Every structure is written in structure tokens, then in C-alpha cells.
Image (cartoon, helix red, strand yellow):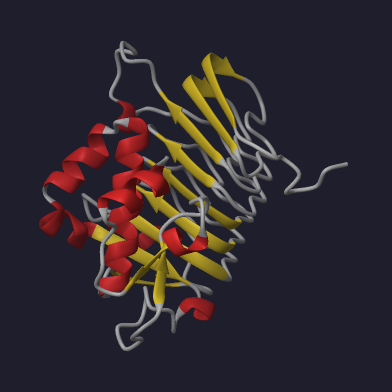
Amino acid sequence: KYGNKGLDGNLNINMFGSAGQSFGAFTLPGMKVRLTGEANDYVGKGIHGGEIVVLPEADAGFVAADSSIVGNSCLYGATGGDFHANGRAGERFCVRNSGAYAVCEGTGDHCCEYMTGGVVVSLGTVGRNVGAGMTGGIGYFYDENGGFEERVNGEIVKHQRVITAAGEIQLRNIVERHFEKTGSEKAEAILDNWDEEVSKFWQVYPPSEASSAVVAESIVGDAVKVSAVAPSEDLCYLPIGAGLNPEQTTRCAD
């Protein structure tokens, strides 16, 4: 009845415990959904805007970066919004994503499958077949132990280190926001030693992104999108070589 932009206001939803299938499906702009616990498959299915954060309980008793916190096919068919999971995701993370900005701390097989837009950041290991059928968007993958390249499906996508200033700006701002939203120990460790750790990331991109500022160093004067849900587009973008000022950091994150 009201469509994708019919919510006039904001909803802040805080939940605790174990969520079933399709938690946070079809979330819209103005919605912030936070789950302390864990969730099953299809978290954020069809998300169009807003924000979903999933993190473990403070006394969970396990290392978040080494443990699954959401299931398979999360953000299936997403068209917008931001997603942060302080833990690992299952298989087919962000399959058919066309606009969401999503962070997790590792995934199973087929990450970014058939993706056409948005940005995905994985702060941990991934399974095989990364980027199969991917025709748009960007992926960043933290490869601490050197096993990532053999897991990429190179039929369409290419991969490289983060070689551009714009790419580094985009990646760092997304990782910073992930830490702010989740308190991720993995994100904090990477940020604390950024100059060294950034060299361990791979960037995956399809031909449609080959001339974008985050991929090609020769592109000058473009802007870098670092979030899908900031209050205004001006605050979602940074000029090349710039960082967020304190006001922008607060407004983009909150």
C-alpha cells in the first residue's frame, strides 16, 4: 500500500535471542533493526533500506569472528540498506544483491553470486566460487592466510589488491562503521594496524566496475560511496583523498 518510501519517520527495533528464517526481510528506509543473539537463513532478504545489525551476546563464550551468527542466503535480492554481522555468515551471502552495503566476518561458498550492485566486505575466510555470475558491485575480502585467490570464480570477475586511494577510503570507512555498530574485535584489530592490514585485502570487481574510482587509479575527481543509508547522499560520498569529519561520521553511522 505504501511502497518502498512510505515510512514517514523512524523505527528502532531491538531484539534478543534466536531469530528464525528471513529475519529483517524487506526492511525499509527509516528502520534500524538490531538483534543480539543469532539468526537463521535469509536474514535481510529483499532489504531496500535502513539497517540490520546482528551481534552475539556479551557473554556468549565464543570468538565472534570464528563463529557463525547468521545462516545461508543472507541479503538475497537486497536492493539497499546497510548490514553488519559480528560473526560469520553461511553460504550465498549477498546472492543477487543490487544495492546493499554488507559486512560479515567470513562466509561460506558462493559469496556475491549474481551480484549486480552494492558493496560486500568479508573480514574472514570465504568458501569457493566467490563472484560467480557477478556483474556489478564491489567485494573486499580480508585474506590473512593467503588462500583467497583459488576461491574466486574468474569467469567474469577480476581481483586485485586495494590499489586506489578511493578504494582504501571506501573500505576503511565501512570497516570503521562495522566496529562502531558491532564492537567487532576483528574490525578493531584491523583498524589498529591499518597500514599493514589493508595490504591483506583483495578487491573483487566485474568489468562494469573496471573504470570506477575505487578500482582504477587513473580515475580522478569522482566520489566514493561508503554507505547505503546515510541521511543524505552528500554524506554518503567522499571526495578522493578525503575522510569523514566528526559530524559526518556521527550522522553516517547513526
What residue is drawn where x is 31% and y is 33%?
65
Q: Is residue 212 or residue 152 the one in the foreground?
A: 212
Residue 138 visible within the image? yes
**Is 210 located above or below residue 225 in the figure?**
below
Which image quadrant is residue 146 in? bottom left
The x and y percentages for residue 212 are 43, 79
Q: Is residue 197 above or below residue 56?
A: below
Q: Nearer the viewer, residue 134 or 145?
A: 134
Task: Give the position of the C terminus as an image quadrant.
Answer: top left
Quarter holding residue 71? top right
Q: Residue at point 11% right, 49% down?
A: 193
Residue at image position (72%, 48%) is 5
Q: Relative to 56, is 99 on the left or the right?
A: right
Q: Position of residue 151 (x, y in %)?
A: 40, 58
Farthest right residue in view: 1
Image height of 69 relative to 104, above or below: above
Taking 56 as reference, is 176 above or below it? below
Q: Is residue 144 left or right of residue 128?
A: left
Residue 128: percent from left, percent from top: 45, 53
Which residue is painted at 46% across and 64% down in the image?
Answer: 234
